[in-house]
Image (cartoon, rainbow, N blue to C red):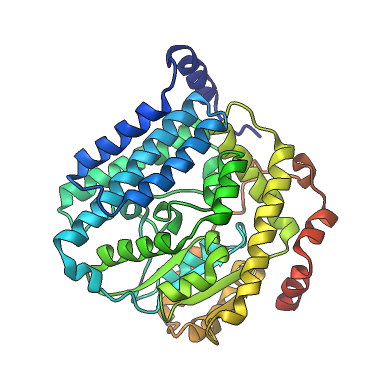
Amino acid sequence: MQRISTTAKVFNGLLAVTGGRRDPDRAWDRLVNQALEATGGDAAGSEAYIADYRVLFDCFIDSGLSALGWMSIIGESRGRLENRFRILKLIAERPEIAAERVEAPIFVTGLPRTATTLTHNIIASSEGHRGPLLWELHYTDLEVDDATRAKRIAKVAQQTNGLLKFSPIYELIHPLYPEKPEECIYILPHGVHQQTRAIMPRYREWLAQHDFTADYAFLKQALQVLQHGRPKARWILKTPEHLNHLDLLVRTFPGARIVWTHRDPVTVMGSVCSLVETTSMLAMKRVDPHEIGPMWLDILSSATERGRATLPQLPPGAVVNLPYHAVASDPWTHLPGVYERLGATWSEADAARLDKVMERPIRDRRHEYTLSRYGLDPDQVHRAFGDYLNLVTGLTR
């Protein structure tokens, strides 16, 4: 399986020769100033955000970025800063945005590769529901004119097409569409998602001490902007990252409901490691699969343990457990009951739409992976996850 294209390899080689010496301090200062200038925003109120993101920026620099990785981090950092300044500027100019009620949102979470994306797409497509679109997560704003909308969508499409140019296999791993719902990670600045491109021990240590309260408050602000002046709908959101912060999630969004998808972690781990290897090869000079396996086994088993430990603190009925097979193999039987527990209504239109969603082709065999490639074996995975497999097995009976 070819993870990155010849184009990516040539691109990295040429830039390594012509790119010159990188100056992180100068690059960071320029990023912040460019983002402020582009949005007409103000850094006031974003001091902690800027300082925290600089930690992440430095950790990426220290990890051994390739030329392509350097360009990617520069572009992403600027985009996130611009979006931050845009959102806060809008709220400062229109204080009524901060009064918007984000009512009973639904958060889909669970280990990666457990049908979280499929579940998210199904629920978000129901009448009265709405998921944030990928282009909106990059350009979070009030309603804009058609020309501005088209321009922004085109820019995001250019980014996603560029990714596929450098790694065609990514379309099989996690396809990205500018006008379809995507994950909260494009708003949440920090979390395990940032480690899909690099081994960053210092960042992991920093994350362990990081207070995510402001990060989730910012997610709420982004949703308030996106719903202000638009028809009201129930937000349907998704990322595996939420497993680490279920208690904070329900505090930030009172009345929230959580759909937790489950699958045998042995099946999960190989797929996750394959994704991480691919994204790391795009960003890093050196990638060792045997480093990826143990790191991500610890990340995901710890997230699962943390999520389960938090359950007693959540309101009764806040979490709906959904086994992988229920949504991937027989959603017609299981989803009506899930909707009922979420306080939503399953309709004939949902059933008809589901028929089309499930008419997807069998996964392309070019995306293949084995645990052993990442220094793991099934027994090792099951030991790390403890009795979680018993829960998964119980749900599938």
Query: Which of the two residues, 369 or 320, is positioned nearer the viewer here?
Result: 320
At x 61% / y 77%, what residue is drawn?
A: 311
Judge from the rendering whether residue 351 lies leftward or rightward of residue 323; answer left or right: left
Query: Which of the two residues, 169 or 102, is positioned nearer the viewer here?
Result: 102
- Identify whether 233 is placed above or below 66: below
Quadrant containing the C terminus is bottom right
Query: Which of the two residues, 210 or 109, is positioned nearer the viewer here?
Result: 210
Q: Quadrant of residue 197?
A: top right
- Identify whether 227 is placed above or below 370: below
Judge from the rendering whether residue 32 lies leftward or rightward of residue 168; answer left or right: left
Quadrant containing the N terminus is top right
At x 35% / y 60%, what residue is drawn?
A: 218
x, y percentage for residue 376? 79, 47
Judge from the rendering whether residue 42 lies leftward or rightward of residue 289; answer left or right: left
x, y percentage for residue 146? 17, 52
x, y percentage for residue 200? 59, 40
Query: Is residue 119 in view from this perspective?
Result: yes
Furthest residue toward top: 17
Q: Quadrant of residue 393?
A: bottom right
- Identify whether 298 is placed above or below 260: above
Query: Which of the two residues, 133 or 332, is positioned nearer the viewer here?
Result: 133
At x 52% / y 64%, what residue is drawn?
A: 242
Judge from the rendering whether residue 179 lies leftward or rightward of residue 315; answer left or right: left
Q: How many marks?
A: 0
Query: Is residue 354 in view from this perspective?
Result: no
x, y percentage for residue 87? 26, 56
